[in-house]
Image: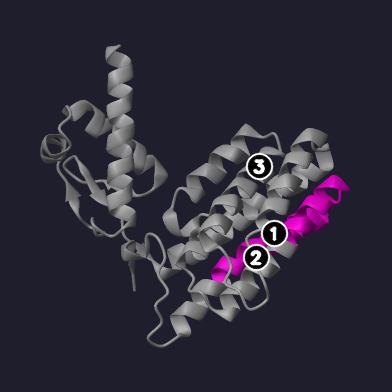
Amino acid sequence: MPDSKGSTHTKRATYELRHRIIEGQLAGGTRLYEVALAEELEISRTPVREAMSRLAEEGLLERASGGGFVVRSFTYRDVIDAIELRGVLEGTAARLAAERGADANKIKKIKSIVTEIDGCFGAIDAPADFDRYSELNARFHDALAQLCDSAIILRELERVKSLPFASPSAFVLGRRQTLAAHRGLVIAQMQHRALVEAIELREGARAEALAREHARIARHNLETSQKEENNDFTLPGMSLVID
C-alpha cells in the first residue's frame, strides 16, 4: 500500500511539474526547490525528488551544480536537431518494420487509426478538427513505432518525443485554423497512408524516406512561423527556447 501511494504521488508530481514547464509557468533557468514543491503539492519530498529525476531523464530538467535541479533552456537549433533526430529514429523504425515484416493485426490497427483521422476533415472550406487530429496522430505514431519490435529504438524515441516541441503532434497543437494549416494536415495524412503501405509491402528504403520526410513537416512549420510577422503561432514548450 505505501509503495502504491508513493507511486501515485510521484506520477502526480511528475505530471504537475511537466505541465508547468510546458505551459511556461516555470521558465528555463528556474531553480526548483524540493522542500517548497513538496509543501506546495502537499506530498513528501521523496516523490518530488523522483519526479524531478524523471523529468531530468526526459530532458526538461538538468542537475544543478551543488545539487538540485534547474529547468532547461533550449536554443532554436536544439529544437531543429530534436525534430531531425525524431525523423531519423522514426525512419529507422519504419525501415526495420518493413524489412522484418510487420504483424498483420498491428497493420490493421494502424489502418483503422488512419481511417479515423480522415474523419477530422470536413468540407473543403470547413475547419479541421485539430484537437482530434492531434490525439489520433499521436496514436498513429506510437503504433507505427511499435511495428519495429525494437526496445532500444522505442526507448530512444520516447526520450526525444518527451521534449514538448519534438513530439509528432506538437506542431498540430500549435497551428492556427488557416487554409495553409489545413493543407498541411492533408499532406501529412497522405504520408500516413504511404508509410503504412510501404511497410506492408516491405519496402524498407521507401518507408524510411517517407518517415523522415514526414518529420520535416514539423521543421517546415517552425521555420514558417519564425518568418511570419505578428503571428499567433504557439507551440508547447517554446517558452523554454532562447534565441
Disc number at residue 143?
3
Amino acid type at circle 3 is Ala
Q: Secondary structure at mark 1?
A: helix
Q: Position of residue 55 (x, y in %)?
A: 34, 42
- Answer whether residue 196 is magenta in the image: yes
Picture layout, residue 129 above or below residue 182: above
Residue that extends furthest to the bottom in the rendered view of this protein: 229
Amino acid type at circle 1 is Asp
Q: Which residue is mark 1?
A: 118
Look at discs 3 and 2 and give the one toward the viewer: 2
**Residue at (16%, 40%) from the top-left corner?**
37
Q: Position of residue 177 (x, y in %)?
A: 51, 74
Q: Do the numbered discs 1 and 2 sit on residues whose CB atoms are within 8 Å?
A: yes
Q: Secondary structure at mark 3?
A: helix
- Magenta stretch in the rendered image: 191-219
| Neighbours of disc 1 within 10 Å: few (<14), some (14-19), many (20+) | some
Residue that extends furthest to the right in the rendered view of this protein: 201
Disc number at residue 121?
2
| Neighbours of disc 2 within 10 Å: few (<14), some (14-19), many (20+) | some
N-term-proximal mark, 3 vs 1: 1
**Residue at (64%, 48%) from the top-left corner?**
140
Picture layout, residue 82 above or below residue 52: below
Picture layout, residue 147 above or below residue 236: above
Give 192 or 81, whichever is nearer the viewer: 192
**Colouring style:** one colour
